[in-house]
Amino acid sequence: MCLGIPMQVERCHGLVADCRQGERWQSVDLSLVGEVQPGDWLLVFTGAAREVLSPQQAADILDALAALDAAMNGRFDPSIHLADLNQREPQLPPHLQAQFDAQRKTS
């Protein structure tokens, strides 16, 4: 299984970028996303950028990875990790919500 890791571009050299995430540095192939600028966020799999991310998307993915790490190491705290999901009811997609509502009316 591969996980995409958000990395921030520090320097660009044509279709290769020096990127970092925390203390980790990596040269990243940009062939699939094209040229980027320092400061841009990339979703990186096995040394290649697969997608350019917004800063918010990168932060959300990094938060989810931190929650996964905490859960795997016995430090998960729902009030801290994935706080945006804490105390929230799951939402059905609109097409399923319509079916659910229709079924409730007939019951």
Image (cartoon, grey):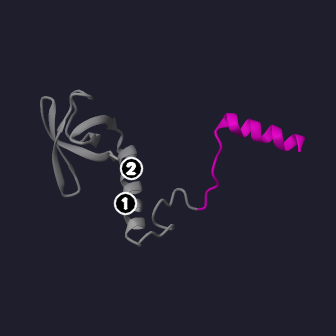
- Please tell me which residue is depicted at 23% across the width and 27% down the height of the picture: 34
User: How far from the left and from the top, in percent, is residue 61?
Assistant: 39, 50
Mark 2 or mark 1: whose residue is earlier in sequence: 2
Relative to 106, is 78 on the left or the right?
left
- As shown in the figure, which amino acid type bears the numbered disc 1? Ala
Helix, strand or loop at disc 2? helix
Which span is picked out in magenta? 87-107
Q: In the displayed structure, would residue 28 be above or below residue 59? A: above
Q: Which residue is mark 1?
A: 66
Q: Which residue is mark 2?
A: 61
Quick one: label 1, few (<14), some, or many (20+) residues within 10 Å? Answer: some
Q: In the displayed structure, would residue 84 be above or below residue 56? A: below
- As shown in the figure, which amino acid type bears the numbered disc 2? Ile
98 part of magenta stretch: yes
- Please tell me which residue is depicted at 41% across the width and 55% down the height of the picture: 64
Residue lying farthest to the right in this orientation: 106
Helix, strand or loop at disc 1? helix
Relative to 27, is 46 on the left or the right?
right
- Please tell me which residue is depicted at 12% across the width and 29% down the height of the picture: 14
Q: In the displayed structure, would residue 30 be above or below residue 61? A: above
Q: In the displayed structure, would residue 71 be above or below residue 100? A: below
